[in-house]
Image (tube, grey):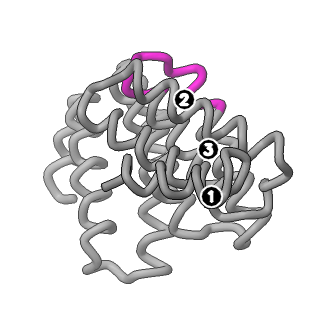
Amino acid sequence: LLTEALKVRKEKLGTNHSDYAETLDWLGYAFLMTNNFDEASEALSEAHRILTENSYKKKAQYGESLKHMSHYYAYVGKPVLADVYGKKTINYYATEYGEKHPEDAYVLGTIAYIANTKGEYKKGIQSLEEALLIFGNYYGKTHPDYVGILCNLGMAYQGLKDYDKAIPL
């Protein structure tokens, strides 16, 4: 479906249109989720290039592109680049939607994932606690995303072998 949509958008809108870039970005993300890293890299990078070079930085697609680039670099084991794009994503959403937007919490979760996989649990915990506050304030403490962060926070405390904090969460 994404490939078909991309073909139609290419024919109707051209390859420099934000909607074409958006579809290419989502196709790249689908490749990433299916471990097709070469295809993901190509599609995500090209989508991000189109959005950047054609002054689409005020469109929502640009924020998604930044977030997907962060996820890509996290998945392929490049934590420094994942962190760079994660911070760019947070800055973008703060500028466009105000600080402490739920999208920030999703990015903070990615930053925490990267930190935790490197054994940097304190950094991961800091990001997860910030994400927890954002989700709690925005959605409430029974929302699935809030509960997911609770689980991740508990696992990070387990990584530190701090079971007194992990278990009550």
Where does residue 130 sit, x and y in percent of width and height?
Answer: 51, 57
Residue that mark 3 sits on: 66
Contact? badges 3 and 2 (CB < 8 Å): no
Q: Do the residues labelled 1 and 3 touch (CB within 8 Å)?
A: no
Mark sitting earlier along the chain (2/1): 1
Residue lying farthest front? 11
* Residue at the spot of label 1: 61
Asked which quadrant contains residue 141, the reply is: bottom left
Mark 3 or 2, closer to the camera: 3
Q: What stretch is highlighted in magenta?
A: 73-84
The answer to whether residue 83 is magenta is yes
Q: Which residue is drawn at 35% across and 33% down?
A: 32
Identified by mark 1, the residue type is Gln
Q: Which residue is disc 2 drawn over?
A: 82
Closer to us: mark 1 or mark 3? 1
Q: Which amino acid does label 3 sit on?
A: Leu
